[in-house]
Structures are given as C-alpha cells and as structure tokens.
Image: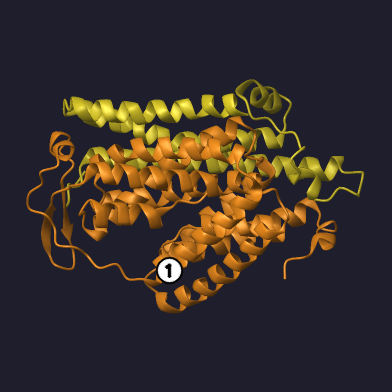
Amino acid sequence: MKKQHGTGIEETIISRALQIGVAISSTLIIIGLGIFLSQLKTTSNTSNQTYLHYVSTSFNFPHSIPAIVSAISGRSGLGLIVLGCLLMILTPALRVATTIFLFAGKHDKPMIKVTITVLCILIGSFVVGVLVS
Amino acid sequence: MFNNANYNKLVSPVDFIIILALISVAAGLLGSLVGLGGGIVIVPVLTLIFHIDIRLAIGASVLSVIATSSGAAITYIKDGLTNLRTGIFLEVATTIGALSGAFLTTVISGNILYFLFAIVLLYSAFAMMHKRKGREVLKTSTDKLANYLNLHGEYYDSNLKKTIKYKVTHTKLGLGLMYVAGVVSALLGVGSGTLKVPAMDVAMHMPIKASAATSDFMIGVTAAASAGAYFSRGQINPFIAAPVVLGVLVGAMIGSHWLDAINPRYVKLMFLSVLLIVSVEMFFRGLA
C-alpha cells in the first residue's frame, strides 16, 4: 500500500474494518426489511393496522442476544434488522479494537491503556443500558 | 403546521417505511452537503411529523449517526488529517459523557429534551453559517498529558503544499468539553460535531482541518456508547431504525459525490431555514 502524507497501512486497515462493518450490517437490515415487508403482506389480514402500532412504546421487538437468536430462528424479519443494528453499533468498537493492535505494534503502552479504557466503556454501555432500564 | 395526528392513522406500515426512507435520504444528503450530519433533522421528523416518542426517535437517530460517521471517517483517515491518538484519547471523555447522557434520558422529562433540542438546533444553525478562523499552530507544548501520550500531530495541507506540524495543549479542558459533547450526543441522538470541533481547535489549539477530521472519526465511537445503552434498553426499534439508517446512509453517499458540484452557499441557506423552523416547532412541542 502506498504511503502518503503520513497515512500508514494500519490506518487503511481501520478504514477497511469500518467499511466491512457498515456493509455487513446494512445488508442484514435490507434483507430483514425485505422479509418483514413480505411477512406483512401475508399476515396483515386485519387492515386496520397503521404504522402507529409498530412505533408505539408498547410494541415488542427483540433487544437481547437470546431474543434475537430466537427471533431469527423463527424467520422474523425484524429479528434480522435488530441483528444488523447491533452489528452497526459494534462497528465503532471494532475500530477501537483494531487501534489497540495498531498501538501494540508500536509498543506504545500508554496509548494501549487509553484505547482499552475506551473499549471497556463501549462494552460496558450494553450493561449500563440493562441496569438503568 | 405538524398537527396531523388524525391523518397519521391512515398511513400503512409500508407507506411509513417508504416515506421515512425518502425523508432520510434527503436528510443524509443535506447533512453531508453542509457538514452537519443527518442526525440533526431525523429526531424532529420522527417526533413532529410521525408523532413518535422522542426516546425512540433518539435511538433511531443515534444509529444513523454511527452509519454516516463510519462512512465519512473512511475518506478522512485516508487523507491523513485525522489525529488518531488525540481522537482515541478524547473518546474516553465522550464515551463517559454519552453513558451519562443515556442515563439522563431516563430521568429527565420529554419536554426538557424538546427544549434542549431546540437550543442545539439554533446553535448548529449558527455554527454552520459561522466560518471558523484558524489559530496559529503551536510549536511547543507544556501540557504534560499531551507530551506523555504524544498527542501532537502533522498533516499535509494540499492548499499550502506543505506539511503542517502542530502541538496539542489544554488536554484537561478538552476532556471536559468532550464530556459535554458526549452528553449532548446521547441525550439528543446527534453527532455533536459542532461541539467537538471547537473543543479541539479553540481549546486544544489543533488546526481546523485536523479538528474536523478527528471529530468525524470520534462521532461514531461516541454514538456507539449511547447506542449500546439504548439498544439493551429496547430504545432502538427496528421498524423505525431500518428506513432511517438505510436512507441516511444512501443520502450521505450521494452527498459525498455531489460535494464539489453544488454551491454550498445555497444549500446552507436552505438548511438554515429548515433548522430555524424546526427549532421553533421543537420549542413549542416542549411547551405542549
């Protein structure tokens, strides 16, 4: 890889990780949306259903790993969209994780500690969400 | 203007997805053309037009912020403008701020969120029209933390055709301001780049180009911290998030290709009027 204006190959790796993360999660969301819409056509016999049903605060959708797994195994389109959303949230964490290896390669201990701290906060955010809900 | 609750009962789920996706494309397109990101108009669209609970709107918006930031950061990192070390260092503050914000949404009322949103919209409108003036780059820094972590940087300025080396200072002030940016990002589901950039170029003496690129790099990580909390709390509704994320992403991709072909001044003036109208509407919704 050509090195230009201080941009190293490792930074290109980070960019690539982000691109792949966004591409995979978007694809899952598109497929999930397609499945959801096809299921909607076959199941919505009750024509009184407006979008308001799906956006109300009482509408249930999977938002934990076991619930996502069971939704997807039940061929739920929404389950696949949720998985895509989860991967989208994890993409920046992947970026941070890649950066740890970047600093490890340079034996830069202080920055490794800083980066691990950020990663721990990101992972902790899922736990915090459950605790305050 | 937006009192259409009765008409909304007639909108089918399929219509909703198509309309929201199209609006999100426009939001992503405009956002990338004026450099504000699409998040700033997604929450008003969801709450004012579709009468969706503001907390669910914030959840969907924060996800679109991650999507566009991950896309934008790709080009910036390749340009060599991003100060990766400073970005990661400041993310400690933005992510903790984002967690605080995600917690705060559970205790403060929806009305206050509307007021806050109105203020941030006004500030963003001001920041968009205000041309930032660069400060003289520092040749030396006495900031212990900046020197210990070697947060200083350099980039190649294609206009000046030379490499600009700069030193970073006032890291503690920078951390404090970044904490606030993280809180705002999580509370309102926006990227809060308009707060991150001055924290770097004004407070920490970084060049404007490096500040903007580093801010874009940080936005996704900041948003991910609150999105993690929102996700596990069930605030990211897939039915709302799917059209928003896909639409904003497509809009931002189109916008990045059109960036050179369009006169940004007209787009900015158009976006400015949108921001001002929406700000007033959000303020009145807060009063309701």
B69 sits left or right of B138 in the view: right
Q: Residues within 10 Å of mark 1 (few under 14, many from 20)?
A: some
Residue that extends furthest to the left in the rendered view of this protein:
B140
Q: Nearer the viewer, residue A114 or A6?
A: A114
B50 sits left or right of B122 in the view: right
Q: Secondary structure at mark 1?
A: helix
Residue B272: x %, y % from top left: 50, 72
Disc 1 marks a residue whose amino acid type is: Phe
Q: Nearer the viewer, residue B72 or B38?
A: B38
Residue A18 image-quadrant placement: top left
Query: Relative to A48, is B270 above or below?
Result: below
A90 sits left or right of B150 in the view: right
Query: Relative to B277, is A124 above or below?
Result: above
Mark yes or no: residue A24 visible. Answer: no
Residue in view at x 33 percent, y 55 percent: B197
Q: Nearer the viewer, residue B96 or A58?
A: B96
Disc 1 target residue: B126
Q: Nearer the viewer, residue B93 or A47?
A: B93
Query: Relative to B25, is A37 above or below?
Result: above
State the orange chain: B
| Chain A: drawing colour | yellow
Residue in view at x 26 percent, y 57 percent: B202
Please state the chain letter of the residue tagged with numbered disc 1 in the rendered image. B
Q: Quadrant of the C terminus of chain A?
A: top right
Residue A36 image-quadrant placement: top right
Residue in view at x 32 percent, y 31 percent: A98
Residue A7: x %, y % from top left: 20, 47
Residue B175: x %, y % from top left: 31, 42
